[in-house]
Image (cartoon, helix red, strand yellow):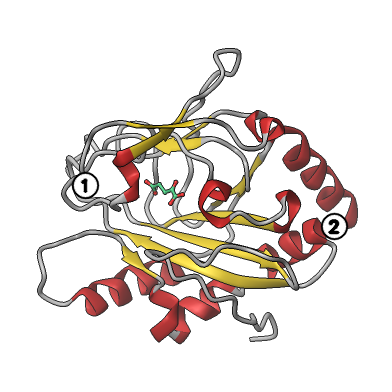
Amino acid sequence: MQIKDLELKLEFFKENGYLILEDIYNDEECNEVVNHAHQVLGPSDDLTPLMNIHKSSEIIQKFMSNKKLLNFINSYFQDTALGLQTEFFFMPPKTVGFNPHQDNTYVKASSDSFISAWCALTDVDKNNGGLIIWPKTHNEEALETVDTGLSKHDNQDPNATIRKTVVPEQYNKESPIIKKGSVLLIHSWLVHASNTNNSDNNRYALLCTYLKEHTDFRSGSYAQRVPFTLDDTV
Ligand SMILES: O=C(O)CCC(=O)C(=O)O
């Protein structure tokens, strides 16, 4: 990325709370992650997302260390980024989406020291479970959350449906089209959600989160986050 281009992207991200980085991964890299996740899953028909698949996988750690992605994140942090958490989504047809939430509700890092990179491993749009974002809601920082009274849905993360963030009504939602291999960067406080997958195919995605070195955070009993160093020289 040229310096001017990087500066414009950082400016857009800070203003809007999100950014799409196009063509970060090629088809082969995306397919390798999907095939690897199916191998880890084995014959099970429970397609609940795999939490922290990187802990046992060099393929995922290498994927997270992508030079273009890390260059942006290190520049945003103005420091070294550590890997923090990964979650692989199979999202088969009819899987309900995630409720509106802010990732930092769970992680509790300081505002500009934590970022999520949602990596599309198939082409996504609002019909097949693509993400929903509320641009600029990161400026609100922590918003109120409420219980929904719902329980865990099939093939979905247990936290996806049980609570939701209340979005102030002045914000409008968008459902960006994201191509396989592109990455949606999400500010720690940006409210986001996902659509139900109404297509006939799985909607594969890998969520990767990053923490600025020496930053406090909450490890969490379900996510069990442990920061780890990334090697962008491979
Ligand atoms: O991939 C999805 O459906 C939602 C993922 C997400 O928003 C999250 O894990 O924070």
Dot in front, 1 or 2? 1
Where in the figure is residue 197, as x and y percent of width and height?
A: 25, 39
Residue 83 left/right relative to 52: right
- Residue receiving disc 2: 2
Instruction: Please identify the quarter of the rendering in which residue 33 is found.
Output: bottom left
Report the quarter where the C terminus lies.
Answer: bottom right
Q: Categorize mark 1 by other alpha carbons within 10 Å: few (<14), some (14-19), many (20+).
A: few
Residues at marks 1 and 2 touching, judged by CB atoms closer than 8 Å: no
Q: Quadrant of the N terminus?
A: bottom right
Label located before the other in sequence (1 or 2): 2
Coordinates of residue 159 in the picture (x, y in percent): 34, 48
Q: Secondary structure beneath disc 1?
A: loop
Q: Secondary structure at mark 2?
A: loop
Mark 1 CB lies closer than 8 A to ligand 1: no
What's the residue at 57%, 32% (across, down)?
143
Tell me where residue 92 appears, x and y as whole percent: 20, 50
Q: Identify the residue at horizontal 21%, vertical 47% (top origin).
A: 152
* Mark 2 surroundings within 10 Å by alpha-carbon count, few (fewer than 14), some (14 through 19), many (20 or more): few
Q: Give the CA separation, mark 1 to mark 2.
A: 44 Å
Q: Which mark is residue 152?
A: 1
